[in-house]
Each structure stands twice: as structure tokens, then as C-alpha cells.
Image (tube, grey):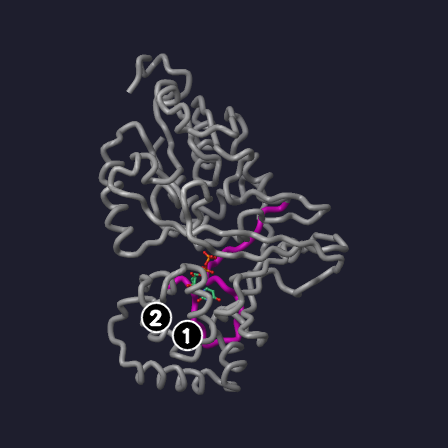
């Protein structure tokens, strides 16, 4: 791999990407007395967790992030870095101007059908399920109808999902929708996890603490100096796109990207909730985020709203979501095989594993890697 012998290399680890996976690995490596350099092609650290302070409002620049996990070890770890303030995510769905609670729960069923008891709601859903006669769901549409019936699928899932993924629900894998809870209680908590919160002081502080002791270089693309970096480190921790690492030799993987439009309003509260999902197909954006509601200590008199527009990814744009359909998964598997053969490289994170991970998955993974 290099002209320098392993022992003469200036770094034990060069970490490519200063996002969550890279930062947790950096933290652990520094604690173990290793020499660590972290590089990132962006001009800042934190990856998609990065926030910008706009006159006292922390703006989640790459989409909203709420940490949630049922893994006590993961929760204790993140809280050992910075205290996480409990926060319950309770988004609202807006379908053609009518509002519904999420995730799918008794409040939603009442708003849709006027039913006031779980038995009535289950009866409606079961009737719709039976009419669709789906036994083993083969795609997202079938999975959604099998979970919650056709009314909810049409009102709260189809439009949102097709905007988000740029594909028909019949072409998408069923797993995507299994992320969302369905409950027969009046409970608007979007996640089922035991622990949920947002770091006190913000995500930037959380990442800065994780990276303490590491040498950091931003505005630095690994691929511009690949040979140099490989010669300088005993081990590369790679968190960028999996296909790019192997020079697209098995073809390019597909991703979804996001375009954000952000506006400032001179109002204390604009939409009254942090996350509003637009589930109809005519509204061009999927979500409107009112950032200040993530932070109960925010005292700003103004508010910042971001509209999210999912778009097709092409080289040069930010890849946000892997599209884990069968074609892409086949290609990704070939790259994963190649990755297994790279003995001095650790691949981790949403992009390098090409998996639709949440933050807790990333931390769990980064804590489990042998360093
Ligand atoms: N989804 C939906 N309606 C909503 C919210 C989500 O149909 O109002 C579906 C959509 O297919 C999405 C998936 O559920 O891709 C997972 O949503 P989640 O909120 O977990 O997405 P993320 O926060 O990762 O963008």
C-alpha cells in the first residue's frame, strides 16, 4: 500500500469524512492513544448533522436530526459526550390543507374516519387489508396497504413516498415503510425507541467533542490525494460513497438528493411544529421544518423555515439517501465483496455501506468496530 513501512507512518488512522461514523471512530481511536487525522471534502465538520446558528436559531442545514435509540450503551455513549435533552418528535401530516397526526395512531384514525376506539379503527383497517388480498408484500405499496389499509396509503403515504424517492411505490422495496410505527393508542411519538433527544448545545458541539485530539482538515477531497493519504496511515476509515471508492467499476449506485429552500419569518412560531410532512402529490416539497421547535430553550422572536425538495442525484450533488432497490442492492453487494478484501480499510456509515441507517445505527456500528 505504501513506500513507508507501517511503523513509520505518521497516522494510525486517516478518517475520510467528519460525519457521525468518522467522528465516533476518531474519538475511540484518540482515547486508545492513536494518531488520527480526519479529512472532509466539505468546509465544515459534522457531515449532515451540521447546524448553522441564524441569530439564535440552530438550523439543521442538511435536514432535521433527532437522535433515538433503544440501545442503552449507545444512549450512554452519546450522553457521555454531551447531555442529550429529551425531545419527542411528533410531526404533522398536511394533505391538501387538512392536518393529521403521525405516526399512524388513534389520533390519525379519528381524524380520517371519526372513530374513537381501537376496535373501530382496527375493523376499518382490516376490511381494507382484506379487500386488497395481499399476503406477502412485494413492494412498498403492498406493504403499506398490508400495514394500514388503502385510505392511509392514499392520504399519508403514496404522495410523500413518490416525491421522496422519485419512483412509484410499486417499484420501491417494502422495508422503507416498515420504519414507521402503527399504533392503536393516542400516541404521536414518531419513534418507538426508549431514548430520544437532541444534544444540549447542539450537534456541532457534539461533533467537536468527538473530534477533540484529532487533526482535522476540511475542504479536502480524499480522491485528490488518495495515494498520499494511503501512504500516510496504517488504516483508512472511509465513510464516502461506496461506488466511488472502487472507481465505479461495477457501475454507479443511485441516491436521492435534497434541495433546501430556507426562509426567515418575523414570527415566534410559524407552523407550530418542528416537522410538517406534505403528503399530497401536488405540493412539490415533502417537508417544512421549523428549526426552533427542536430546541425548547430557543428564545428568538423570529423563525427559520426550510422546505425540502427531493431530487434525482447526479455527480457533484450531495448523496443523501441510498436507494436500496434490487438493482442497486445487487451492485452494492459486489462493492461490499471488494470492501471485504481491503484489509487496511474500514468502511462505515450510510454512504460507505449504502444502507438507509439512522444515527443510532451508525453509533452502534462505530462502537463495535475493533480498533
Ligand atoms: N413516509 C410516508 N409519509 C410520511 C412520512 C414517511 O409515507 O408522512 C414514508 C416514506 O416512504 C419515507 C419512509 O416512510 O421514505 C420513512 O420515513 P422517515 O420519516 O423515517 O424518513 P427520513 O426521516 O429518513 O427522511
Specify the quadrant that holds the N terminus.
top left
User: 176 or 197: which is nearer to us?
Assistant: 176
The label on residue 141 is: 2
User: 158 or 136: which is nearer to us?
Assistant: 158
Q: Residues within 10 Å of mark 2 (few under 14, many from 20)?
A: many
Q: Residue 152 in the image: state x and y as whole percent.
A: 44, 76
Q: Are marks 1 and 2 in contact (CB under 8 Å)?
A: yes
Quadrant containing ligand 1: bottom left
Q: Residue at x 45, y 35 (%)?
A: 17
Q: Which residues are magenta?
A: 178-200
**Residue 82 placement, left or right of 165:** right
Specify the quadrant that holds the C terminus.
top left
The answer for how far apart the CA atoms under marks 1 and 2 are is: 8 Å
Q: Residue 12 in the image: state x and y as whole percent.
A: 39, 22
Which type of secondary structure does the marked residue at label 1 adopt? helix
> Where 149 sits versus 91, above or below?
below
Q: Residues within 10 Å of mark 1 (few under 14, many from 20)?
A: many
User: 163 or 135: which is nearer to us?
Assistant: 163
Closer to the N terminus: mark 1 or mark 2?
A: 2
The label on residue 153 is: 1
Q: Residue 118 in the image: state x and y as whole percent.
A: 46, 82
* Count of marks placed on residues: 2
On the image, which quarter does residue 33 sit in? top left
Q: Residue at x 36, y 12 (%)?
A: 8
Judge whether residue 182 is colored magenta.
yes
Judge whether residue 35 is colored magenta.
no
Q: Residue 123 in the image: state x and y as whole percent.
A: 39, 86
The label on residue 281 is: none
Amino acid at each position: 500500500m505504501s513506500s513507508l513501512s507501517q511503523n513509520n507512518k505518521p497516522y494510525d488512522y486517516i478518517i475520510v469524512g467528519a460525519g457521525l461514523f468518522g467522528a465516533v471512530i476518531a474519538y475511540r481511536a484518540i482515547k486508545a492513544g492513536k494518531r488520527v487525522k480526519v479529512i472532509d471534502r466539505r468546509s465544515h465538520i459534522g457531515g449532515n448533522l451540521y447546524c448553522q446558528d441564524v441569530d439564535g436559531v440552530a438550523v439543521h442545514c442538511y435536514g432535521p436530526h433527532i437522535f433515538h435509540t433503544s440501545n442503552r450503551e449507545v444512549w450512554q455513549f452519546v450522553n457521555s459526550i454531551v447531555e442529550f435533552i429529551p425531545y419527542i418528535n411528533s410531526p404533522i401530516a398536511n394533505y391538501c390543507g387538512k392536518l393529521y397526526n403521525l405516526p399512524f395512531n388513534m389520533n390519525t384514525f379519528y381524524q380520517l374516519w371519526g372513530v374513537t376506539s381501537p376496535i373501530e379503527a382496527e375493523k376499518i383497517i382490516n376490511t381494507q387489508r382484506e379487500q386488497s388480498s395481499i399476503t406477502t408484500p412485494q413492494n412498498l405499496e403492498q406493504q403499506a396497504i398490508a400495514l394500514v389499509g388503502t385510505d392511509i396509503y392514499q392520504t399519508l403515504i403514496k404522495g410523500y413516498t413518490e416525491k421522496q424517492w422519485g419512483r412509484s411505490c410499486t417499484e420501491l422495496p417494502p422495508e422503507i415503510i416498515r420504519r414507521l410505527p402503527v399504533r392503536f393508542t393516542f400516541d404521536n411519538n414518531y419513534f418507538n425507541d426508549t431514548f430520544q433527544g437532541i444534544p444540549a448545545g447542539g450537534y456541532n458541539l457534539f461533533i467537536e467533542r468527538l473530534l477533540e485530539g484529532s487533526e482535522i482538515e476540511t475542504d479536502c477531497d480524499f480522491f485528490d490525494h488518495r495515494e498520499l493519504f494511503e501512504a500516510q496511515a496504517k488504516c483508512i476509515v472511509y465513510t464516502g460513497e461506496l461506488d466511488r471508492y472502487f472507481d465505479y467499476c461495477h457501475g454507479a449506485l443511485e441516491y436521492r438528493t435534497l434541495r433546501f429552500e430556507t426562509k426567515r419569518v418575523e414570527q415566534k412560531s410559524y407552523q407550530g411544529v418542528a416537522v410538517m410532512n406534505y403528503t399530497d402529490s401536488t405540493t412539490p416539497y415533502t417537508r417544512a421544518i421549523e428549526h426552533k421547535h427542536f430546541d425548547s430553550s430557543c428564545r428568538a422572536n423570529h423563525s427559520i423555515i426550510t422546505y425540502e425538495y427531493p431530487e434525482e442525484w447526479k455527480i457533484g450533488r450531495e448523496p443523501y439517501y441510498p436507494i436500496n432497490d434490487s438493482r442497486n442492492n445487487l451492485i452494492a453487494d459486489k462493492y461490499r465483496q471488494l470492501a471485504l478484501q481491503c484489509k487496511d480499510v474500514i468502511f462505515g456509515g450510510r454512504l460507505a455501506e449504502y444502507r438507509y441507517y439512522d444515527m443510532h445505527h451508525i453509533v452502534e456500528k462505530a462502537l463495535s468496530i475493533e480498533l
